C-alpha cells in the first residue's frame, strides 16, 4: 500500500490527470448535441441559430462552449498542481480548498432547485417544440399566453432534435405535456396509419390519440405541408413544372432533405414509389441549411415547407404536386389528457388560439425571424397582441 500510495500513484498522477482533462474537455464539446433530445445546454443556441439563420447566436453558443471547456481545463490543471504539492502546509491548504469547493457546489445545487421549491402552487407545464422557426414562434406564444391567462408556469424546451420521433415518446412518458404538431404527421408517424391523410379523418385522428392519453386542442388555422423546390436554373434546363416532370430527370439530380423526411411513412420512399422517381444522390441536412445548400449548388432539389420564410427570396421554382401525394398538415396542439384534468383552465387558453393564424401570417413571421433577425419571442408577442389575446 505504501508503494502504491507514495510511489506509483504520485508518478502516474500527471498521466491520469491528463486523461481526465482530455475527457472532460471532449465531453463538454460533445455536450452540445444534448439539445437534439431536448436536454438543453449551450447546443440549443447553436442549433437554434442554424435553424433561424442567426449567425450571431450560433457563434455565441460555439464560443461559450469553447470558453467553458478552457475554464474547466484550467481548474483541473490547478487541482493537478495542488495534489502534487507535498508537506503539511500544502495538505492543510488542499483540505480548505476542498471544503470550499464542496460548499460552492452545494450552493449552486441549492440555487438550481430553490426556484422550483419556492414557485407558486399553480404548477408547471412542460412545452416542447420541433427544430423549426415557426415552432419556436408558437412555443413562445404558448408560454406567453398560458402564463398571461393562468397561474401556471411554462418550462419551454425548444428545438428538440428528431421532432415528433423524440417528442411523442417523451409525451407518453410524461416528460413533456404539450407541443405543436401537424395532423398529417400525427396520422402517419404516431398512429402509423397507411394512406394519405385528409382533414375529413380528424375524428379518427382524435380517437387514435385518446388511446395514447392525449388530445388535439386549439387548431391554429394554418397548414404547413411538404413541397419540392428546384434551383431555378435546373428547372429551366429540364423544363420542370410538376413532380412528374422531376421524376423523368431525378437520376441526374441531388436531393437534400432533413433526416426526418427519409424516415417517415409519407416521406422519401413513399414519394419515390408514388412518382417512380429515383434521385442520383440524396443528402441529409438540417432544415436551416437546405436553402443555403441549394443556392451554393450542393444540391439541386430540396424538400420544403409551404410556410418557409426563405421561400419568398430563394432562387428556386416550387413544383406542383400533380398527383396530390402530400397529405394535409394542419397545425394544432397535442396535450396530455392528465394535464387537462389537473389544469382544466389550460383547455380554455388553448382554444383561444383556434383559427388565429393563416399560412400567410406564418410565412411572414418565419421571414421576420430568419431574414430580419427578429427574436421569436418578440414575434410571438406581436402576434398575440395583434389578435387581441394579450
Image (spheres, rainbow, N blue to C red):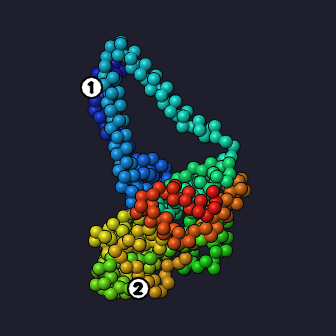
Q: Quadrant of the C terminus?
A: bottom right
Q: Secondary structure at mark 1?
A: helix
Q: Quadrant of residue 228?
A: bottom left
Residue 122 location (% of width, % of height): 68, 46
The secondary structure type at the circle numbered 2 is loop
| Residue 235, percent from left and from top | 33, 82
Residue 224 placement, left or right of 337 = left
The disc at residue 121 is none
User: Can residue 230 be spotted in the picture?
Assistant: yes
- Front in this rendered view, residue 116 or 336: 116
Q: Residues within 10 Å of mark 1 (few under 14, many from 20)?
A: few
* Residue that numbered label 2 is attached to: 242
| Quadrant for the N terminus in the image | top left
User: Within the image, what quadrant is residue 12 found in?
Assistant: top left
Determine whether, in the image, residue 116 is placed left or right of residue 67. Answer: right
**In the rendering, at what x and y percent does residue 41 appear?**
45, 47
What residue lies at 67% left-to-right and 64% top-to-bottom? 351
Give whichever of 75, 57 is nearer the camera: 57
Report x, y in % for residue 132: 47, 62
Query: Circle 1 is placed at which residue position?
Result: 11
Q: Residue furthest top?
A: 88
Q: Residue at x 43, y 19 (%)?
A: 96
In the displayed structure image, the side of residue 325 where residue 289 appears, left or right: left
Amino acid at each position: 500500500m505504501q508503494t502504491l500510495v507514495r510511489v506509483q500513484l504520485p508518478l502516474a498522477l500527471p498521466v491520469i490527470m491528463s486523461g481526465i482533462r482530455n475527457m472532460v474537455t471532449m465531453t463538454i464539446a460533445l455536450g452540445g448535441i444534448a439539445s437534439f433530445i431536448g436536454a438543453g445546454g449551450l447546443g440549443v443556441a447553436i442549433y437554434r441559430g442554424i435553424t433561424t439563420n442567426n449567425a450571431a447566436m450560433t457563434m455565441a453558443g460555439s464560443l461559450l462552449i469553447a470558453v467553458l471547456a478552457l475554464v474547466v481545463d484550467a481548474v483541473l490543471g490547478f487541482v493537478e498542481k495542488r495534489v502534487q504539492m507535498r508537506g503539511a502546509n500544502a495538505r492543510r491548504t488542499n483540505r480548505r480548498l476542498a471544503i470550499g469547493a464542496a460548499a460552492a457546489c452545494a450552493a449552486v445545487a441549492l440555487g438550481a432547485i430553490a426556484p422550483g421549491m419556492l414557485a407558486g402552487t399553480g404548477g408547471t407545464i412542460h412545452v416542447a417544440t420541433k427544430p423549426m422557426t415557426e415552432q419556436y414562434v408558437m412555443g413562445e406564444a404558448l408560454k406567453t399566453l398560458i402564463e398571461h391567462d393562468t397561474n401556471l408556469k411554462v418550462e419551454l424546451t425548444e428545438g428538440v432534435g428528431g421532432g415528433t420521433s423524440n417528442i411523442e415518446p417523451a409525451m407518453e412518458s410524461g416528460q413533456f405535456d404539450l407541443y405543436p404538431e401537424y395532423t398529417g404527421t400525427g396520422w402517419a408517424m404516431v398512429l402509423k396509419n397507411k394512406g394519405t391523410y385528409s382533414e375529413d379523418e380528424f375524428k379518427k385522428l382524435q380517437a387514435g390519440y385518446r388511446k395514447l392519453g392525449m388530445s388535439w386542442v386549439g387548431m391554429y388555422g394554418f397548414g404547413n405541408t411538404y413541397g419540392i423546390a428546384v434551383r431555378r436554373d435546373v428547372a429551366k434546363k429540364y423544363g420542370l413544372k410538376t413532380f412528374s416532370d422531376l421524376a423523368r430527370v431525378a437520376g441526374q439530380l441531388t436531393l437534400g432533405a432533413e433526416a426526418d423526411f427519409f424516415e417517415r411513412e409519407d416521406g422519401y420512399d413513399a414519394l419515390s414509389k408514388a412518382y417512380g422517381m429515383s434521385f442520383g444522390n440524396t443528402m441529409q441536412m438540417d432544415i436551416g441549411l437546405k436553402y443555403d445548400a441549394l443556392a451554393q449548388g450542393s444540391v439541386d432539389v430540396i424538400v420544403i415547407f409551404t410556410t418557409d420564410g426563405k421561400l419568398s427570396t430563394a432562387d428556386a421554382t416550387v413544383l406542383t404536386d400533380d398527383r396530390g401525394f402530400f397529405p394535409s398538415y394542419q397545425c394544432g396542439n397535442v396535450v396530455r389528457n392528465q394535464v387537462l384534468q389537473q389544469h382544466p383552465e389550460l383547455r380554455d387558453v388553448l382554444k383561444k388560439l383556434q383559427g388565429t393564424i393563416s399560412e400567410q401570417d406564418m410565412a411572414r413571421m418565419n421571414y421576420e425571424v430568419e431574414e430580419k433577425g427578429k427574436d421569436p419571442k418578440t414575434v410571438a408577442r406581436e402576434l398575440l397582441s395583434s389578435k387581441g389575446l394579450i
